[in-house]
Amino acid sequence: MSEGRASDSICYMDTRTRLADEISREAARADALQRQARDLLLTAAHRGASEGLSQREIATIVRRSQPEVSRLLRQKPPGPLALRVSQQRPRVMDILTKYGVTDARIFGSVATRMETSESDIDILIETPRALGLGKLSRLERELSAVLDSHVDVVPVRGLPEWMRQRALAEAVPL
């Protein structure tokens, strides 16, 4: 009898674990879509302003209030690399997960919206165990291929304290 209850309990835990994983993936996808939608709206508002439209005209076109358009125009729009990261986020997350990354954040010029044509993509990672140089190099190559840009992957654990604080201060979740 107790064996039957134990196997039922294990099946229940497996089902709950799978459900939790599915819900977590769906929530992460929703977050990514929300960020992508925000970035698209921001880009559209800036495009309208650069073409000479008034805030009121932009507000009417994008179906937002004029104060919201004003707020959008005070923000710097995402650059091409930030948009690419946003669009490729699911593939990037799959690659990071494959390498055991438990947390990843963008930092540097892409995070601060100061990217230039010379910018690369800087990703700060946390892993339960240190990645060797070979794995770190393969991870960078895979991410660079997906994002069609040079990617620097920087493990948090290897940074000097002053650099860690600076990177974390400007980092944004992937």
Image (cartoon, rainbow, N blue to C red):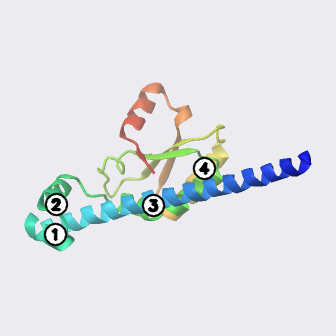
Q: Pick whichever of labels 4 and 1 is earlier in the sequence.
A: 1
Please say if the residues under marks 4 and 1 sit with CB atoms less than 8 Å apart. Answer: no
**What x and y, as percent, mark residue 130?**
64, 37
Q: Residue at x 68, y 52 (%)?
A: 17
Q: Residues within 10 Å of mark 1 (few under 14, many from 20)?
A: some
Residue position for label 2: 69
Of circles 1 and 2, which is in front? 2
Q: Return the residue found at the far bottom.
A: 61
Q: Residue at x 48, y 53 (%)?
A: 151
Q: Pick whichever of labels 2 and 4 is earlier in the sequence.
A: 2
Q: Residue type at mark 3? A: Ala
**What x and y, as percent, mark residue 57?**
10, 71
Which mark, residue 48?
Answer: 1
Report the front residue among 43 and 28. Answer: 28
Residue position for label 3: 30
Report the front residue among 81 and 129. Answer: 129
Of circles 4 and 3, which is in front? 3
Q: Quadrant of residue 15?
A: bottom right
Q: Is residue 144 in sight in this rendering?
A: no
Which mark, residue 137?
Answer: 4
